[in-house]
Amino acid sequence: MKYKRRDPEKLDINIQIDATAWAKILLWTDMAQGEFSALGLVEELDDTLRVTEVFLLEQQCDRAGTEIDQAAVAQLMMEGVDPGKLRCWIHSHADMEVFWSKTDDECIQGLANGEWLLSLVVNKQHESMMRIDQFHPTQIYLEDVIWEVHCPIDPELEARCKAEFKKKVRESEFRPFGELEEAMDWMEWEDQLCDI
């Protein structure tokens, strides 16, 4: 069966995954023979839901599903991870299309926390689909929402880059495009005068 995707929905809130977390997801997807699952820590910022860290827990996997060890989830919480911020479920579909299967729907229902949950499915072609579920007062969801990778710039790296750029790059004075176009028009008109 071929699943036809629709255009992702743009929400009034930004959904992001930190670059390091995204890199882990892609690496785990490439390593897995079949599927795998992970949980993500989500920070609620002013207008952004940002997955800041992902956790690969002990689990049993095959080509069509995963089962995370509940003792591993309990251990994660005993290590100080706030269960109220574990609001993203990540899993792979190996070589299959990215879509929400009946098994995925059941897993998401099992992760219902009374509020909301992000879910991400990725495949070995690095295609992805993000979903957001709201569980109260009833379960509703958007199955394909726009999200982006968050790449924060390290202030020390920014300072080093600025210093290196200033030291090595000499730039000519740039004219605004309007002035440049006027100068080019004048040169063309001058050339035409010389041809007369």
Image (cartoon, grey):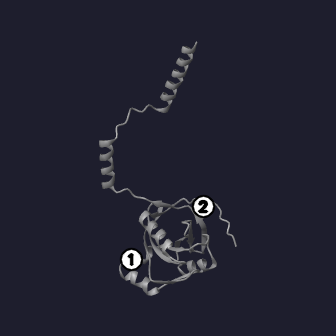
Rendered image: mark on residue 81: 1
Q: Residue at x 35, y 80 (%)?
A: 79
> Number of marks in the image?
2
Reading the image, the residue beneath label 2 is: 9
| Residue for point 39% across, 77% down | 81
The three-letter amino acid code for the residue at tag 2 is Glu
**Residue 162's x, y, as percent?**
32, 47
State left or right for residue 6 relative to residue 76.
right
- In front: 185, or 34? 34
Quadrant position of residue 58: bottom left
Please rate how many residues cluster around mark 2, counting C-alpha atoms within 10 Å: few if below 14, some from 14 to 19, many from 20: some
Whole-percent x, y for residue 52 in the image: 42, 67
From the top left corner, tell me how far across and down residue 161 is, in percent: 33, 49
* Mark-to-mark CA distance, 2 and 1: 30 Å
Q: In the depicted view, which residue is nearer to us: 137 or 2? A: 2
Q: Is residue 88 visible?
A: no
Marks 1 and 2: in contact by CB < 8 Å? no
Which kind of residue does numbered mark 1 sit on? Val
Q: Residue at x 54, y 59 (%)?
A: 12
Looking at the image, residue 39 lies above or below residue 176: below
